[in-house]
Image (cartoon, rainbow, N blue to C red):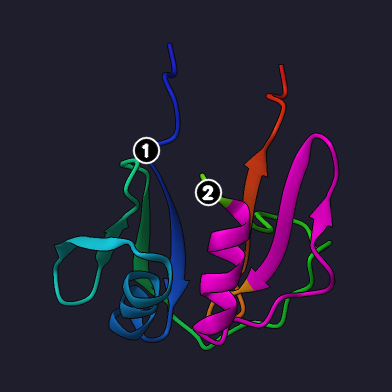
Amino acid sequence: MVKGIEHAAIASPDTEKLAKWYVETLGFVINFNSGKTFFVKAPDGSMIEIIASESGLAPKAMKDAGLRHLALTVGDYDAAFAELKAKGVSFLGEPIVNADVKVAFFTDIEGNFLHIIQRLKPLG
């Protein structure tokens, strides 16, 4: 029945600014722009919808209830990590690197949690 996830949405007080951050920092492209709502698309076709929020940014923590992060797949973890660092991205703690996976958490310019991930062994 369900084939996958087409997109996730992020509510933002400045949709254009956040969309541009995803383009400039992560290499997404804007593939829809209504002036208020943006869709940004990753090279693999996955998308994030950026919609106008009705309030400012709400405080949140990684373990609060609800959607907590988006995991962004990368083909070359070390190169992606270095490129994001060069673009001024601040990572939240040390990267997790072991025989199965490489992960590093960070936030976008509005504090939404993201992480890059490269699975060296598929989950199953």
Provide the residue designation for mark 2: 74
- The dot on residue 114 is none
Boundaries of the magenta span = 77-106
Q: In the rendered image, which quarter is residue 95 located in?
A: bottom right
Q: Does the segment drawn in magenta span residue 103?
A: yes
* Residue 17 seen anywhere in this rendered image of the structure: yes
Q: Does the segment drawn in magenta span residue 101?
A: yes
- The dot on residue 6 is 1
Amino acid at circle 1: Glu
**In the image, residue 63 above or below residue 74:** below
**In the image, residue 112 above or below residue 44:** below
Q: Residues within 10 Å of mark 2 (few under 14, many from 20)?
A: some
Residue located 84% across and 36% down the image: 99
The secondary element bearing badge 1 is classed as: loop
Residue located 49% across and 83% down the image: 87
Asked whether, in this view, residue 8 is left or right of residue 30, the answer is right
- The image shows residue 4 at horizontal and vertical percentages of 44, 26
Q: Residues within 10 Å of mark 1 (few under 14, many from 20)?
A: few
**In the image, residue 103 above or below residue 88:** above
- The image shows residue 105 at horizontal and vertical percentages of 71, 65
Q: In which quadrant will I find the N terminus?
A: top left
Q: Nearer the viewer, residue 118 or 39?
A: 118
Q: In which quadrant will I find the C terminus?
A: top right
